[in-house]
Image (cartoon, helix red, strand yellow):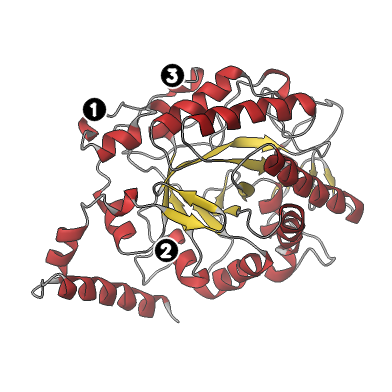
Amino acid sequence: MTSIDAEKNVEKSVETKAENKGVTNTLTKAVTNTENSTAKLFQPLSIGGLTLKNRTVMAPMTRTFSPNYIPTDEVAQYYRRRAEGNVGLIITEGTFISHKAANGYERVPAIFGEEALAGWKHVVDEVHAAGGKIAPQLWHVGSVRKEGIGPDKTIPAYSPSGLYKPGTPNGIAMSQADIDEVVSAFAQAAADAKAIGFDAIEVHGAHGYLVDQFFWQGTNQRSDKYGGSLENRARFAVEIVQAIRLAVGEDFPIIFRFSQWKQQDYEAKLCQTPEELTTFLLLLSNAGVDIFHASTRRFWLAEFEGSALNLAGWTKKITNKPVITVGSVGLDSDFTGEGSVDLGGTSNPTSIDGLLARLNNDEFDLVAIGRALLVDPEWVNKIKDNKADEIAQFNKAALMKLS
């Protein structure tokens, strides 16, 4: 199906909804009558063994408040406040797996070792006590790592081809043994997450970190079965998902976050056409992904020419699986960097009418809120109670504390 055909289908869907409501005069009027409704945003959703009370998600955002890589009670209370604020699903900051080169930042949490897992169990227990659901984002930074970062500061970066970005070397290229070790570490992290009570897991396959470095031709120059074609470049992620599925069983949800853009290149495109995106997504879907998290910097931008669908909309259309959209939700400007170092300057609250129109048109199933929720734990409740005018402004000072 072409992108233009897809757009016609979207228009037809809206027209059908208008007719069902007795509105037969114009498409514009049909959209106006439905786009402001928050009812669907607050409908429950069941996915495998996971039932969410609404469609809101806390987006994963790097916070550097875990000394010695161990989540503290302060971290636990930070997440609990979002659960108390009625967030449907909390996805944690990236938490690095047990491979020796997985970490790229100091004071971010690990998800291996007795102390770190005990710290995460405390987080989980606090979120559950407040009626929330929570999933860890499993993370390996790949060639973003620099020597001098712990836990072992002597370890270089590991990546598909030893490239930080096209033409810029960093670290070493991974052997088959290295790949196998990382796949195993992802699976072990998922099994441990399930054992301590997490409700799902998310694989970080976006933003130019390790899994995405395999996807991206610019950083994957391999000539073996992990390089070359899109199918080969997706093999590493497919093996991770398959290994996780074996480790956690059939009913434990696997979320997979992916992106076109990279922190090394905001204009990068993993898939240039809907056809390439179809090939890419079906490989992951068939491997066992339950929920896709389509990361964009601005949710309202169309992904391909000829269609208004964003990346999440295309993902839903291709896979027919639950999809999370994300990207400057509720704010008037996007972030300008990955991680906690630079999440943008000052951003003001703004209308979510356009987002609601897309959600009500079934373009995606869940909505991830990032900076707006970071600065205001009550964002979801304020939207639900029609108190959007009380939502706090985001500024970089919010990054200096766990509010």
Quadrant where the C terminus is found in the figure:
top left
Of the 4 image quadrants, the one containing the N terminus is bottom left
Closer to the eye: label 2 or 1: 1
Measuring 52% from the left and 57% from the top, which residue is drawn there? 47
In primary-sequence order, the first of circles 1 and 3 is: 1
Dot 3 surroundings within 10 Å: few (below 14), some, or many (20 or more)?
few
Q: What number is the disc on residue 390?
A: 1
Label 3 and label 2: CA atoms lie apart by 33 Å
**Dots 1, 3 in contact, CB < 8 A:** no
Picture coordinates of residue 12, whole percent (x, y): 26, 77
Q: Earlier in the sequence, mark 2 or mark 1?
A: 2
Q: Nearer the viewer, residue 370 or 227?
A: 370
Residue drawn at x 24%, y 43% is 351
Would residue 139 be seen by someone viewing this image from the given angle? no
Q: Nearer the viewer, residue 126 or 56?
A: 126
Judging by the rendered image, the residue that carries numbered circle 2 is 313
> Residue 366: where, in percent of width, then height?
42, 52
In the image, what residue type sits under mark 2?
Gly
Of circles 3 and 2, which is in front?
Answer: 2
Which quadrant of the structure image shows residue 10?
bottom left
Name above or below for residue 51 compared with residue 314.
above
- Residues at marks 3 and 2 touching, judged by CB atoms closer than 8 Å: no
Residue beneath disc 3: 397
Q: Secondary structure at mark 3?
A: helix
Q: Amino acid at mark 1?
A: Glu
